[in-house]
Image (tube, rainbow, N blue to C red):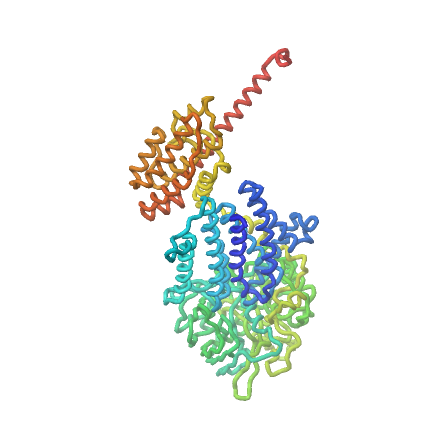
Amino acid sequence: MSGRARLTLCSAAATLMASCALLPLVDAGTWILQAAFLLAIQSAVGAAARRVPLARPLTVAAQALITLVLLTLVFARDHALLGLIPVPETFQHFGDLFQAGTDDVGRYAIPAPLSDGIRLMMVGGVLVIGLAVDTLAVTFRNAAPAGLPLLALYSVAAGLSNGSSDWVWFLVAAAGYLMLLLAEGRERLSQWGRVFAGAPRNPGGQLGPVAPVRTGRRIGMAALGVALVVPLLPLPAIQGGLLAGAGTGVGAGNGSGGTISAVNPLVSLRDSLNVDEDRTVLTLNTNATDLSDMYLRIVSLDDFDGTTWKPSKRHIVTVPDEFPTPTGLGGDIKRASITTRISAAAGYAQDWLPMPYPPSSVKITGNWRYEPVGMTLVGDHGQDTSGKTYEVKSLDVQPTAEQLAAAPEAPLSIRKDYTQVPDSLPKVVARQAREITKGATSDYEKAVALQDYFAVTGGFEYDTDVEVGSGRDAIARFLQDKQGFCVHFSFAMAAMARTLGIPARVAVGFAPGSPQADGSVAVSLKDAHAWPELYFEGVGWTRFEPTPTRGTTPSYTVPDTPGQTTPDLPQSSESADAAPSAAPSASTSCSAKDKKLENCGAALPLDQAEQSDRGTPWYEFAGWVLLGAAALALPLLPMLWRLRRRSVRLASAQHSAAGTATGGRPGGGADGLEAAGAGSAILLDTPSQEASEATVAHVLAVWRELIDTAWDYGIEPDEALTPRRAAARIVRIGELDESVGRSVHRVASAVEQVLFAPQPRAEAGLSEDVRQVRAALRARVSWTTRVRAVVAPRSAIRAVWDLSDRWTAVKASWTSRATHLTTLLRRPPSQQSS
C-alpha cells in the first residue's frame, strides 16, 4: 500500500474513531455503520481524484459533490431527480429534516431515539468532518490542523453526553489522531528517499525502529497520557455543553450571575411520563386550606413563535433569602401565606423546581439559581430534584372578579413582551377570538369568555388520540377539529389572549394531586399539566383553566350572583390513586415508536405538509455556516498557501512546475528565473540553454524556497545580490554553523551551475539541504517568531504579488487583443482581403 493510500485510510479511520463519541447520544448505534460506509465512498473518491491527478480544489469539489449525492440518495431520494441528482426540493427537504432533528435534540433526553432528523445530523456531520480531515491531512498534506475538526466532533459529543465514560471516547479519538499523525510522518519520510534508522539497541544487533517514527510515538504517547491525567487533577473546569439545559452549566457556577436558555420544560415532563404505569413523583405537606388550588408550577413559557411556546433566555442569579413581591400584585388584593414541604421521588429528576406560585422563599440544599422574571428555581451544573426535600413559602392570592374586571391597562413593558404574536399566526385565530369575546367590556370578561368557550360551550373534547404536529396552522387546525389536551388548550387560549391585547403566557407543572389518609398530598405523573396565565395590573399573573375535565376552575372566574346558574366547568384531574387515564396529559413522553406513528402530543395538530414552514430556511442556515467557515478559514489562508508552495517547491523534479517570471519586488515573482538575479535571467533567454526546463525549474524553485524560508524567519531577500553572495548573507545574518552553511552554499552553487554551465545538471539532495537550513533557522529564533513563520509567514505576500502580476498580464493581453481588433476594423476592405 502506498503512503498516500495509507494516509487516506488513516484519515477515514480517525474520523470514524472520533465519531464513536456520538454513540451514547442516541439509543441505536446503527447510524455509525451507515456513516462508515458513506465515509469510505467519500475517501475512495478523494483517493481516485488524487491519483488522476486532479488539482486540489477539484479534488475537494469532487468529494463534496459525491457527499451531497450520497446524502440525497439516503435521505431525500424521493425529492431528487432520478433519486440521485439534487434539485431545489431536495435542499428544502434537507432543511426540514435538519429542523426536525434540531427539535428532537431539544425534545428528548439522552439517549434520544434515532429519528430521521437526528440520523441526518449524525451521518451528515460525520461526512462533513471526514471531508475536512481528508482535505487537510491528505489533499493538502498537513495532518496537524486536521485535529481541529476531530476535536470539534469530540467536543460536541462530550458536551452533550455529560457521561462518566467520556474519557474512553477521548482515548479512542486521540488514538485515531495520533495514528493519522504517524501515517503522515511516515509518508513525508518516504518522499525524502531512503528512510534512515536509529542506532542498534544492542551491540552487534540489527538497527532499531526508524528514529523519527519511534520519537513520534514517544511524543504522542506522552501527550496522550498528559491529556488523560490532567482532567483528574483538581483544576478549574468549564462544565456544561452545547444545547445543555438547566441540568448542566446554566450559569457561571459562582453565584454571580449568568443566563439560562434551556429546552422546553414539556420535554422533561414528557420524559418523566414515559412509563407504563402511573406513579407518585411528589409528596406534599401543606397548611393550605384549599387543596384544589394547589398547582405546582415549574416554569412559564413566554416566547411564542407561532408554532409553539418555549421559555425565553433569562438572566439567573443567586437564590435570595426572600423573594420580591410578584410583578403587578397590589396591596389591596387579599392573600394568605402558606408553607408547603415537598419531597421528590428518587427517580424524578427535574431541572426546574416545582413550587406553588407565587413563591416567597425556598429552603433547599444543592446548586440552584433563581430566575427573577418567572420566579423559578433552576438546577446549576447537573443539579436536579431527584430525592430532594425542600420547603416553600408562597402566597395564596385571592382576587375577586370585580378587582380583575376593574384592573387598569398593563404597563407598556408588560404589553410589549407578552402580547406579541408572529405574523405567521393565521388570521382566523384573532378573528375567532374577537367573535368569542364579542360584547365583553374588559380584559377579564374576555379572558373568562375564552376559558368558557374552550372548557364548556365550544364543543371541545379532551382527547390524546389526535394527529399532532407543529406549524403555523397548528392552532387553526385545533380550533377546527376541537380535539386535544392541555397543551392544545393552553397554547390556543394564550395565543388568542395575545391577539386581544391581553398579556399571556403558558405555565407548565402539575395540577392539584390527591389527598392521602395521613394528610399529605400525592402528585403523580398523570397530574402533569399546562395552563395559561394572563396578566392583570394590580393582581399580577393569574391562572385560568380552559382544559375540559382537567385541573380546577379558579373561583374568581365563577359568577357568584344569587340564583344564577353556571355550566359545569373543569374539576380536579384524576390522581395517582384513581384509575389511570386512558390518555396521558400533554406532557406525556413520546417514545420513538409513538413518534413515528404520530401519536405524540408535543405540539398542536398539523398536516405533515406544513412542516416546511418551520424554523430557519435551509439556505439561510447554509449561508451562516459558509460565513462562519469563511471567518475561520480567512486567517489561515497565508499558512495554507505557504504550506502548499513549500510542498510544490520541494517535490521531485518531475512533479514540479516552473513559475512565471515577474519583477519589481524583493526576490522577484513566484518561482521565476529571477530567483538567481537579474543577470542570470538574461543568460537563460539565450539559445545556449540546453538543460531541460524541468531541471532548471526544480533547482530555481528550491532556491526560492530557501530565500523565502529565510524571509519567514526574519532575513529579508535582496534581489541585487548574486546567488553566492545571497547565500553568504543568509549564513552571516542567520548565524548558521559550518555544516548548515555548506547546505546553503550547495543550493546557491546548484543555481549557478544550471544558469551558467554549458551542460546544466541537477544535484541530488537539495530539498534536504533546505529542510536542514529551515530547522537551523527555526532553532535560533524565539517562539513568537516560530509561530509567526508558520501562521503568518512574511513570504506569503508573494501570493498578493502573483495575483497583481497576473491581473496586469491579463489586462495587457486584453489591451493587445483590443488594439489588434481595432486595427483590423480600420483597414480598407482591399487590405483585409489580401
Name, please, the residue furthest toward the top: 830
Query: Residue 485, located in which quarter of the rendered image?
Result: bottom right
Query: Residue 249, located in which quarter of the rendered image?
Result: bottom left
Name, please, the residue furthest toward the bottom: 517
Q: Is residue 379 above or below residue 67?
A: below
Camera-side residue: 808 or 278? 808
Q: Quadrant of the C terminus?
A: top right
Q: Is residue 573 above or below residue 731?
A: below
Spot occupied by residue 34 in the image (x, y as percentages of width and height) = 61, 58
Q: How many marks on residues?
A: 0
Residue 322 visible within the image: yes
- Please report the residue visible at 40 percent of the width from the left and 67 percent of the height from the top: 232
Camera-side residue: 453 or 17? 17
Left or right of residue 600, residue 368 in this image = left
Spot occupied by residue 11 in the image (x, y as percentages of width and height) = 52, 53
Residue 441 visible within the image: no
Q: Is residue 618 above or below residue 796?
A: below
Spot occupied by residue 225 in the image (x, y as percentages of width and height) = 41, 62
Spot occupied by residue 132 in the image (x, y as percentages of width and height) = 52, 50
Camera-side residue: 746 or 61? 746
Camera-side residue: 266 or 794? 794
Query: Residue 682, located in which quarter of the rendered image?
Result: top left
